[in-house]
Amino acid sequence: MAVPQLDPAKLQLVQELEIEMMSDMYNRLVSACHRKCIPIKYHEPELGKGESVCLDRCVAQYLDVHERIG
């Protein structure tokens, strides 16, 4: 059984949409996890241990949910 081939214009459109979708997902992830894990006023120039752990968990959960939905 042969796999149908996309013409170059359709392939480029699919690639552009994929990039746009991944960029949107990344921006939403950064915004949500930053809002949840990092205080509005920065007290230290580096992330604290609690902030790092929170970010790790937030990103993992966000990606897990995104994968399940997708």
Image: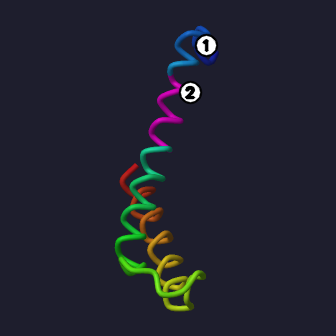
At x 61%, y 10%, the residue is 8
**Rendered location of residue 7, percent (x, y):** 59, 8
Kindly identify which numbered label has been placed on residue 15: 2
Query: In terms of secondary structure, what is the magenta stretch mainly?
Result: helix
Q: Quadrant of the N terminus?
A: top right
Q: Is residue 20 rendered magenta in the image?
A: yes
Residue type highlighted by circle 1: Gln
**Rendered location of residue 36, percent (x, y):** 35, 76
In the rendered image, the residue lying farthest to the bottom is: 49
Mark 2 vs mark 1: which is more N-terminal?
Answer: 1
Foreground pick, 4 / 48: 48
Q: Is residue 16 above or below residue 36?
A: above
Residue type highlighted by circle 2: Gln
Question: Circle 1 sits in a helix, a strand or a loop, which is it?
Answer: loop
Q: Which residues are magenta?
A: 14-22
Which residue has dot 1 on it? Answer: 5
- Using the rendered view, name the quadrant where residue 21 is placed: top left
